[in-house]
Image (tube, rainbow, N blue to C red):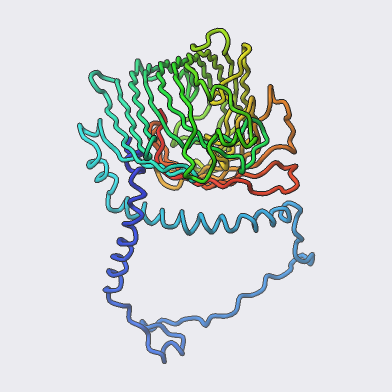
Amino acid sequence: MRASITISTLALSLFVAPLGALAQTATSSSAPAAKEAPAAEKAEGKEADGSSQRPISEKRALPDYDGRGEEPLSLGKKMLVVPRVLLYPVHLTFEYLVRWPLGRVLTIAERDSWADAVMDFFTFNNRQAGVIPTFFLDFNFRPSLGVYFFWNNLFVENNDIRVNVGWGGEDWLKLTVVDRYRINDKTELSIGGEFWRRPDHIFSGVGDEFDVGNRSRYFREYEQGTFSVRHRPWRNSEIRFTGILTNNIFDNGDTDLGDISLSEGVVQGKFALPDAFKEGYFAIKARIDMAVDSRLNRPEPGSGIRLDFFWEFGSDLNDPGEREWLKVGGVAGAYFDLSSNRVLGLWAQAKVVNPLEDRPVPFTELVELGTQAMLLGGFQPGDLRGRSSFVATAEYRYPVWVFLDGSLHVSVGDVMGRNFDGFELESMRMSAGIGLRSIGDRDNSLNMLLAVGTSPFNDDNFGVESVRFLFGTQTGF
């Protein structure tokens, strides 16, 4: 909780850092200057205290002891030249526009105990409860402001409440409430509800034929209730059973962001009317998540493996026995702690959804990429939807601060047809990006991502097709 509160105020801290630096400069300029040695003594090679100083000579060239000359560049070093040149602007941007100013802010924050001051301001009841302002900016979507509320051990011991309220203008409203009860250190029960309506969702068609020119906007309002049981038997492994009841209503969306409405896209022949858009759906879903994760929590080394599997059944109660679907997927990954929680992760994810009856799957229940940073995060949520998907990712994560990690990622993948129909490496897309994310609190975190997405490798005009920037706090419940 300390992490979420401290991290949520870092954006405001960026405005304070220049003032602190200015104060330090003024202090240092008022200090007495060191006595400088007379010019005559400098010429004789003497310092002000009378000690001698050896004249500076030119650096001696390294002798060629074995007579073999300079070692030629290896093939590996030659191959690194191109990516180094291409990524150098990214390195400069991240080093001097992100890491350096952020490091200055964090140094001042630690020196002046900002964390304690912020904690005391936003929390009460011995820091067991608090109200924290939130914000979120995702390029090409409406920005939003909100409030995150928490209260630990409310009413009874081990009972925790989480509430998030967000507002993003007309027809944009979000309310999420979750109550968790910890039976013991390994098992918890939770019940929650969510209401969310927003008019800026993206629909660009179904399948791998995404084109930026096909983007359209639609309105979605849904109410959802959940009940889950979560058990963590070993390290970060877990088993979770979840029941979901959800009601969805759709309409044409906001065109003020420069895109057409979904109905206009259908009329113009850009794509077919998505399934369940006209009538909506009221569904019950049952889901099982299982994960085997050998990694330990920090500050332990981050090496290990993780295997995930999920199974989800859904049925539309407005059309029982006619519209049902099954969604399954999994992740396999290996993580290598190179040094002090600087972790290289290599993992792959696959998902597939199929109808079990005659009627097709509602379009918002299809596989969707871009919703998570490491799953082709260079694309906007809604750009890539399909019956199945595959993504392989390489990520390097490293600590920036005690509560903050930096990351670099490259991922390759795409959505496909039924049961991975059309799976070909040359038809995949690529996403690459840099980011920052807070750690230590699964319920409220700060995230920043700058990423790009490309057209398929076999495209004659292969290149960057999508750019995404997001910054703000996100809830994990």
Above or below 241: residue 67: below
Residue 249, given in percent of the width and then of the height, sits at 46, 24
| Residue at the bottom extreme of this rendering | 40
Q: Please tell me which residue is depicted at 61% across the width and 18% down the height of the picture.
A: 360
Residue 133, given in percent of the width and then of the height, sits at 31, 40
Q: Please tell me which residue is depicted at 28% across the width and 65% down the height of the picture.
A: 23
- Residue 435 seen anywhere in this rendered image of the structure: no
Q: Nearer the viewer, residue 344 or 196?
A: 196
Above or below 76: residue 202: above
- Residue 255 seen anywhere in this rendered image of the structure: yes
| Residue at the top extreme of this rendering | 321
Above or below 443: residue 256: below
Residue 399, given in percent of the width and then of the height, sits at 46, 45
**Number of marks present in the image shown:** 0
Q: Please tell me which residue is depicted at 44% across the width and 19% down the height of the picture.
A: 247
Q: Nearer the viewer, residue 192 or 358?
A: 358
Q: Quadrant of the N terminus?
A: top left
Q: Quadrant of the C terminus?
A: top left
Q: Quadrant location of residue 31?
A: bottom left
Q: Nearer the viewer, residue 262 or 76?
A: 262
Going by the image, does 360 lie left or right of 135? right
Q: Please tell me which residue is depicted at 40% across the width and 22% down the height of the picture.
A: 223
Q: Quadrant location of residue 473?
A: top left
Residue 85, given in percent of the width and then of the height, sits at 65, 58
| Residue at the front extreme of this rendering | 267
Q: Nearer the viewer, residue 66 or 191?
A: 191
Going by the image, does 197 lie left or right of 87? left
| Residue at the right extreme of this rendering | 68
